[in-house]
């Protein structure tokens, strides 16, 4: 009820058109109008969302301890390693090869310069945003910071969890101290930070998700055809389950 009406909220797994599947996610925020949802037996365990239409994913934990923190990182990796389908093209403006993009919940895709183009590897707004929402912290703050660092050392750039909100204990996020700002990718940061506070941690998460929905980008809607086509090509053969009439 607190997110824009243009998005849907579900749970299940995320897929890409290269045959990869994420681990099951507690929360999946997706483009309600455009993203096809493949559901078998009305079970979240067999519900699949194409990554091109997924905006953000989240894990819900009643308590945050070492085991759950490790699980959060594993879930994030499984999502961040999915690949949105994007092909370089040359537009009418002769700006060079570029990867077109569109804003979430928009049909319109844009021609742009190569630097402005869609770039899942390097731009946070072109990625699926990964977060965790936890009820309470079971670790001492110093232990939490050390365990987060251990998991981060085993995580490649681009695979990391972007934000952890602990309802009554605080937030974990990346930051760039030299630029005095919060960032959401390890490669853009020079540190990560545990902000200990008792209030407004959920509100901060909601505000961040709203900004991702508003400003995030993905690939053209035609990409969904890769999931909807039964085959890449159909050969119609004489006399095989059909009737032929010459023109």
Image (cartoon, rainbow, N blue to C red):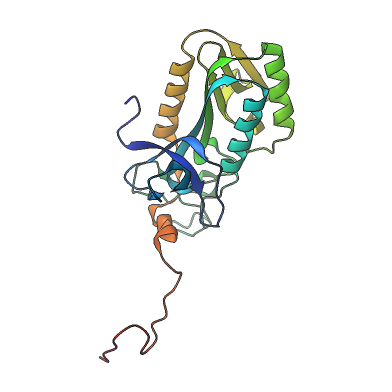
> Percent x, y for residue 220?
41, 52
Seen as rendered, the residue at the extreme top is 198
Of residues 26 and 166, which is closer to you in this image?
26
> Percent x, y for residue 4?
33, 31
Name the quadrant of the C terminus. bottom left
Res 11 seen here: yes
Dividing the picture into quarters, in which one does residue 68 lie?
top right
The answer to whether residue 146 is above or below residue 79 is: above
Seen as rendered, the residue at the extreme front is 41
Dividing the picture into quarters, in which one does residue 148 lie?
top right
The answer to whether residue 113 is above or below residue 174 is: below
> Percent x, y for residue 224?
41, 55
Residue under the image location 31 percent in, 84 percent down: 242
Residue under the image location 35 percent in, 28 percent down: 3
Name the quadrant of the N terminus. top left
> Percent x, y for residue 218?
45, 45
Q: Is residue 228 left or right of residue 70?
A: left
Residue under the image location 53 percent in, 56 percent down: 97
The answer to whether residue 240 is above or below residue 148 is: below
Label count reads 0
Res 92 seen here: no
Residue under the image location 33 percent in, 48 percent down: 107
Of residues 238 and 161, which is closer to you in this image?
238
Of residues 193 and 96, which is closer to you in this image?
193
Dividing the picture into quarters, in which one does residue 179 lie?
top right
């Amino acid at each position: 009820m607190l997110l824009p009406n243009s998005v849907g909220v579900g749970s299940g797994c995320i897929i890409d058109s290269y045959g990869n599947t994420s681990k099951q996610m507690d929360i999946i925020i997706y483009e309600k109008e455009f993203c096809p949802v493949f559901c078998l037996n009305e079970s979240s365990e067999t519900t699949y969302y194409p990554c091109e239409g997924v905006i953000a994913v989240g894990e819900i934990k009643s308590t945050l301890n070492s085991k759950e923190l490790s699980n959060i990182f594993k879930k994030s990796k499984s999502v961040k390693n999915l690949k949105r389908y994007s092909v370089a093209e040359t537009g009418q403006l002769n700006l060079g090869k570029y990867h077109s993009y569109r804003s979430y919940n928009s049909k319109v895709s844009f021609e742009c310069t190569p630097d402005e183009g869609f770039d899942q590897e390097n731009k946070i707004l072109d990625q699926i945003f990964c977060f965790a929402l936890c009820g309470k912290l079971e670790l001492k703050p110093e232990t939490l910071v050390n365990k987060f660092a251990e998991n981060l050392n085993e995580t490649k750039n681009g695979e990391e969890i972007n934000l952890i909100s602990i309802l009554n204990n605080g937030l974990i996020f990346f930051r760039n101290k030299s630029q005095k700002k919060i960032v959401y990718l390890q490669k853009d940061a020079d540190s990560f930070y545990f902000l200990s506070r008792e209030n407004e941690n959920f509100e901060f998460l909601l505000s961040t998700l709203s900004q991702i929905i508003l400003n995030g980008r993905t690939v053209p809607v035609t990409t969904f055809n890769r999931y909807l086509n039964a085959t890449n090509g159909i050969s119609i053969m004489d006399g095989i389950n059909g009737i032929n009439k010459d023109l």
